[in-house]
Amino acid sequence: MDRYAVFGNPIAHSLSPAIHALFAKAEGETIDYRAIEIPAGRFMIFAQRFFDEGGRGANVTLPYKVNAFHWAGVRSARAELAGAANFLMKRGGNIEADNTDGAGLVADLTMNLGEDLRGKRLLLFGAGGAARGVIAPLLALEPRSLVVANRTAERARDLARQFAAHGAIESSALDGVPPGAFDIVINATSGGTRGEALSLPPQVFGPDTLAYDMAYGASARSFAAQAQARGARASDGLGMLVEQAAESYLLWRGKRPATRPVLEDLRARLA
Ligand code: NDP
């Protein structure tokens, strides 16, 4: 049976094994996909052993996306732009790294939520690994502007500089966001996962805003509540998770599974 895994720490609550089991079932395939918790400082040893023992591919989540990127022998252009990898695959004796987070976000926004980003004003909160991975795919959809705002303003500035050639991108501090409501506000900060309230400028949300949190479940509630208080629609990042998984399945196995039934199944389980 073809073996796959998701590497991370902590990893016990990862939905990836359930998502890939549902994909495989729908495709009439049998795969072995497990969550593997890797102790701090031991990424290379665990990853090497997994592939030496016949593993075909792996997803990678916090805190190992940068380790995976550097460890792989071959890196896709998307991974190079993100500086991080959430995807590994053994092919022809090489370990290849890719980053499917941006494709996952774009698929969720455009296919599941029906958003057309062309000409829109986008605001991205956060300048960590997830933000870095989605900037180029967002700019490729030709929004009017993309503002990256971060608690540590310097990190937002660095990202805006790095991606300047990809489209209309600017940066700001959290208290210096340009005025007016945005069409789409994306939360790529991790505070919600630790139960920290985000102090966001409320005027970024309006009745026509889509407020999209990359987090899901309880972690996404505070951001959604702030947006909904200003009349905005809110979405969590469960769709992004499922779509990035579908991209992984496609790269590993040559078929992109249908995502809608899997998303509905997960929503029912989490409800
Ligand atoms: P990182 O640790 O790399 O970055 C964290 C970011 O959050 C930084 O910009 C940091 O700001 C900011 N931040 C943290 N706490 C606060 C706070 N209290 N107030 C304001 N800003 C804060 O994390 P990632 O980029 O990897 O992940 C970000 C989020 O995206 C997580 O919730 C993660 O679960 C989610 N995610 C979801 C995916 C999906 O498929 N749905 C895929 C990938 C990520 P500073 O620079 O100032 O420290």
Image: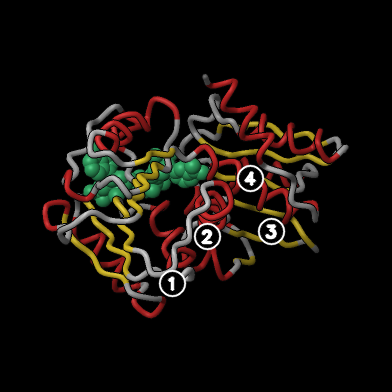
Amino acid type assigned to the residue bearing label 1 in the image: Glu
Amino acid type assigned to the residue bearing label 4 in the image: Ala
Disc 2 on helix, strand or loop?
helix
Residue pointed to by mark 1: 142
| Labels 1 and 2 touching (C-beta < 8 A) | no
The image's colour scheme reads secondary structure
| Labels 3 and 4 touching (C-beta < 8 A) | no
Disc 3 on helix, strand or loop?
strand
Indicate which disc, 1 or 4, sits on the residue closer to the N terminus: 1
Task: Give the residue at x 32% y 65%.
Answer: 146
| Labels 4 and 2 touching (C-beta < 8 A) | no
Amino acid type assigned to the residue bearing label 3 in the image: Ile
Residue pointed to by mark 2: 70
Q: CA distance from mark 2 to mark 3?
A: 11 Å
Q: CA distance from mark 1 to mark 2?
A: 30 Å
| Labels 2 and 3 touching (C-beta < 8 A) | no
Up the image or down, 6 lies above or below 155; here it is above
Label number found at residue 245: 4
| Labels 1 and 4 touching (C-beta < 8 A) | no
Nearest the eye: 222 or 9? 222
Is 157 situated left or right of 65 in this image?
Answer: left
Is 5 situated left or right of 62 in this image?
Answer: right
Label 2: how many residues lie within 10 Å, few (<14), some (14-19) or many (20+)?
A: some
Amino acid type assigned to the residue bearing label 2 in the image: His
